[in-house]
Image: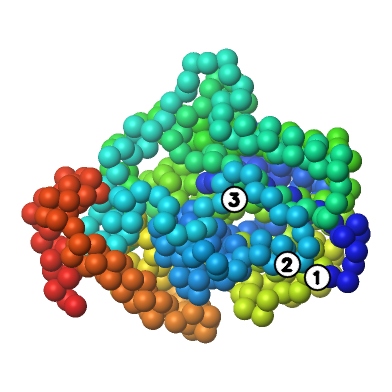
Amino acid sequence: MSSATSSRRPNILLISSDSMDGRIMGCAGHPAANTPNFDRLASEGVLFQNAYCNSPQCCPSRASMWSGKHVFSCEAWNNYKGLEPGDPTFQTCLDDAGYDTHIIGRTDHLSGRHSWNVRLNAWLREANVAGQQKAGPKQRFGVEETDEVRFSETDWVRVEETVEWLRARAKSPGDPFFLSVGFLQPHPSFVTTPYWLDRIDPNKVTLPPVDEASHPVLEFMKIAKGCTDELTDEETLLIRRIYYAMVAEVDAMVGEIVEALQDTGLGDSTWVINISDHGEMNLEHGQYLKNSLYESSVRVPLIVNGPDAQAGCVIEHPVSLVDIFPTLMDMAGASKPDWLEGRSLMPELTGAPSRHPDWVLSEYHSNFQNTGSFMLRSGKWKYIVYVGYEPQLFDVEEDPEEVRNLAPVMAEIVRKLDEKLRGIVDYEEVDARAKAYDRRNFVAWRAAASDEEYNEKMRQAIRGYGDDDEAKVRTWLAKG
């Protein structure tokens, strides 16, 4: 525990959304966004303009953040395999430091969650079996004809619970608190109401550009996600506008919580951190959901303000969610475990010289991709490795929408970035380890399942499952 007394240590409020692209805020420069509360938080605190998740999927991303370790270290390979009970997290350390910790809503960092389909498709990815979703974006959007303003009911209940908790806490102060509030939105399906849709100017919603070339791993991903139906320009623009409207509703939720924090008198003594677990492709690169290492999928919001934060500061250099754990330790005045792999952002928050490395790492090993992928963002470059396939290279300053893969024409930059990435992670070893996990689990399940159960689960997980898919599975297993 810090030598500081409990009364002098700040409270901490962590607000997380699900599937919010960090670029879709007014303070981030997005023309169609309607986010007055995020913008106000940024004007009063610090906006990390280039914040990334460490894996573009719910459980792996959250497991990495809560453990303070990269995915390859904590082995949170997919939405079924996260942290195990008893694994230390920042909540563990804050408890030990004398904080009163409280959780409202979504955390999703532990193993054993999500559907059978998700885990089976993750195990089968090396077999090149794309377990296509039964509904793609064409079937998963709409505008509900209702006057209801609090449309995302589950999350608004969490807002009310949070406000009541803060009011009660203000009346009975004690040890400093850490409060985590987790929302489900703006996760697809893309559904909103006229109230929120009207807050997005349709004239500012644009069609995404088309990639100059496709990549085989991303083509597999499109099939696996069910992104195979043609969408009209009108449908595309409406879906994108609906997503921005969903973000606007989340912004309103955050605004109510921050207002309650101020009204209760807790604002001046509380750090507020706003994040999301990953982004949302929102039809960029012909896809929806997350799961890729493109900016729309891997960029997240990160806004922090509090007792010592610089007001209106914008940090340009890349950071990532693995940095949250050590930052929380500094906020709490607690010692940092020596196994943390992120770097505290307290220097950036207070105006001290940054100690952050000049790179961030993200990786993906789950159900919508047939091999492991690794992203290194360093300076203006984004380098993406797909194990067993050709890499991609993007200049995210000149080509922020990543439509032009420079890897075929910039061999020396590729060589240098690959050398740097290999110095951080042995990506071929990690990919082999993740795929060995997949195989072990599939083989164990197949041995225990009856033929009837096996065929039923395979039909559920793989759209149109038949002899061709079974042949791929058998070929994969025969490789040993």
> Which residue occupies 29% across, 66% down?
441
Count of labels in the image: 3
Q: Is residue 99 left or right of residue 102?
A: right
Query: What's the CA distance linking mark 2 and mark 3?
Result: 26 Å
Tell me where residue 246 sits by quadrant: top right
Question: Is residue 403 at least partly visible in the picture?
Answer: no
Of the pair 171 and 133, the residue shown nearer to us: 171
Q: State which tag comes first along the sequence, 1 or 3.
A: 1
- Judged from this view, the residue extending furthest toward the left is 467
Residue 276: mark: 3
Question: Is residue 52 at least partly visible in the picture?
Answer: yes
The disc labelled 1 sits on which kind of residue? Answer: Met
Residue 96: mark: 2
Residue 1: mark: 1
The disc labelled 2 sits on which kind of residue? Answer: Asp
Helix, strand or loop at label 1? It is loop
Image coordinates of residue 409 in percent, x first then y, are 41, 72
Q: State which tag comes first along the sequence, 2 or 1.
A: 1
Query: Circle 3: is it few (<14), some (14-19), or many (20+) Cα within 10 Å?
Result: many
Helix, strand or loop at label 3? It is strand
Q: Is residue 451 left or right of residue 356?
A: left
> Which residue occupies 33% across, 47% down?
225
Do the CB atoms of the residues marked 2 and 1 lie less than 8 Å apart?
yes
Query: Circle 2: is it few (<14), some (14-19), or many (20+) Cα within 10 Å?
Result: few
Image coordinates of residue 252 in percent, x first then y, are 68, 33
For the C terminus, the image quarter is bottom left
Between disc 1 and disc 3, the foreground one is 1
Query: What's the CA distance linking mark 1 and mark 3?
Result: 29 Å
Query: What's the CA distance linking mark 2 and mark 1?
Result: 7 Å
> Which residue occupies 18% across, 65% down?
447
